[in-house]
Amino acid sequence: MYVGALTLDILLGDVRSLKQKRSVVRPLIAELQRRYPSIAVAETGHLDLHRRAEVAVAVVSATPGNCKDILDACERMVAFRPEVELLSARQRLYNDEE
């Protein structure tokens, strides 16, 4: 069993309030969940900042290659969204021995 974790640090566009931030981040999370139903995704950081968001993605798989493929696809999807700028992405892979 392998668990893959992806942390995305995102800079939002012209956002001036937490309400506007939600209107950008919630559809992003919903699109990730719709496109990849086997993942868990949530906003995990920068909760009090208007123009920044941290989104985390987790996936469980039998092979490390499948974990990496899904996390890479999630990262690409976020990177190509025009309303956000991906500042950094960090992937971790855990197996059942860790």
Image (cartoon, rainbow, N blue to C red):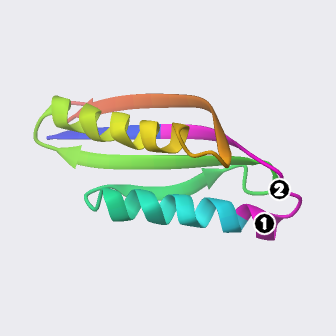
Instruction: Name the quadrant containing residue 27.
Output: bottom right
Q: Residues within 10 Å of mark 1 (few under 14, many from 20)?
A: some
> Mark 1–mark 2 contact, CB under 8 Å?
yes
For residue 15, above or below residue 3: below
Residue ID at (66%, 61%)? 24
Residue 15 image label:
2
Query: In this picture, which residue range is highlighted in magenta?
Result: 7-21
Q: Earlier in the sequence, mark 1 or mark 2?
A: 2
Task: Determine whether the residue tagged by mark 2 lies in a helix, strand or loop.
Answer: loop
Task: Determine whether the residue tagged by mark 1 lies in a helix, strand or loop.
Answer: helix
Instruction: Name the quadrant containing residue 95.
Output: top left
Which residue type does callout 2 highlight?
Answer: Val
Q: How many marks?
A: 2
For residue 51, above or below residue 22: above
Disc 1 marks which residue?
A: 20
Residue ID at (29%, 48%)? 59
Q: Is residue 10 magenta?
A: yes
Quadrant occupied by the C terminus: top left
Residue ID at (83%, 52%)? 14
Residue 26 position within the rendered picture, expressed as x and y whole percent measured from the top left: 58, 66
Q: Is residue 88 left or right of residue 92?
A: right
